[in-house]
Amino acid sequence: MTQLPEIIRDIQRVSPEVVKKASTFQAAILADVAGRRGTMHSRVAPVHHAMTVAGPAFTVEVRPGDNLMIHAAIALAQPGDVLVIDGKGDQTAALMGTLMLSACKKLGIAGVVVDAAIRDRVELLDLGFPVFSAGFNPAGPTKYVPGRINHPICAGGTTVCPGDLIVGDADGVVVIEREKAPAMMALADKKVADEAARLAAIASGDTASKWLPAALRAAGMLKEGETL
């Protein structure tokens, strides 16, 4: 059996067309149509609520507090990729700061999602580069522990495979499998249209949820024929 190398350079990515379309949707819309799954833990949040990101995952696994493999990933990633880093949720040291994230921006990387701490929060607000992290810590990392690039990882409690679709906004980050992503776009369009129609109905005074009585009966909270 041939063993996979720890660093995989060539991956299949979700298409640019799907990424462009996905970038027009809220993460919540995509999470809903994808089966209400694939969202990262809320600890992984944007540095600023206005930050958004969409692109194929370029995955990195590191040991807690060490960023050696992130430096390697920055050198290997393509423009438009989203670095997704499994830092084990560790917040005792920052894995990235202004220097590394400035390099990411210069190289055309679409954004960074790191399940660990980062630092230089104020400078990152000025940088204008999408960064999602599990927190902040002023301590710097080590740079000598091996890891993996472009293997399946778990970040924010969610499985992420290389090339998967990543979409992040003020609500957090959603991951959609590369093969599944194209089919989700039409469903997302319909979801947006349905919600717009519902908002219009609410604005006109129709605030009742038509599905609620049946759901309450199914849960045993209302008897047949009974209403709220």
Image (spheres, grey):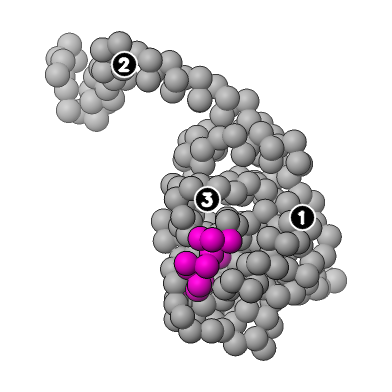
Residue density around tag 2, few if under 14, some if 14–19, many if 20 or more, within 10 Å = few
- Residue receiving disc 3: 51
Can you say whether 134 is above or below 40 in the image?
A: below
Residue 116 visible at all: no
Left or right: residue 17 versus residue 39 is: right
**Percent position of residue 123, x then y:** 52, 67
Determine the secondary structure under disc 3: loop
What type is the residue that disc 3 sits on? Met
- Closer to the camera in the image, 139 or 11: 139
Question: Considering the numbered disc 1 on the image, is that residue within a helix, a strand or a loop?
Answer: loop
Earlier sequence position, callout 1 versus callout 2: 1
Residue at x-position 63% and y-position 46%: 54
Q: CA distance from mark 3 to mark 2?
A: 29 Å
Q: In the rendered view, would you say 14 is above or below 158?
A: above
The location of residue 122, given as percent across then percent down, is 47, 67
Separation (CA) of disc 1 from disc 2: 43 Å
> Callout 2: helix, strand or loop?
helix
Q: Quadrant of residue 96?
A: bottom right
* 154 part of magenta stretch: no
Name the spot of residue 207 as percent of width and height, x first. 26, 18
Residue 40 sits above or below residue 180 on the image: below
Q: Residue at x 50, y 25 (%)?
A: 191
80 and 217: which is toward the camera: 80
Q: Which residues are magenta?
A: 113-127
Inspect the image, locate mark 1, and give the three-letter code of the amino acid beneath it: Pro
> Which amino acid does the dot numbered 2 rest on?
Ala
Crowdedness near tag 1: few (<14), some (14–19) or many (≥20) residues, C-alpha within 10 Å: some
Location of the N terminus (image quadrant): bottom right
The quadrant the C terminus occupies is top left
Is 127 situated left or right of 58 in this image?
Answer: left
Q: Dot 2 corresponds to which residue?
A: 203
Using the image, tell me which numbered label, if any, was put on residue 79: 1
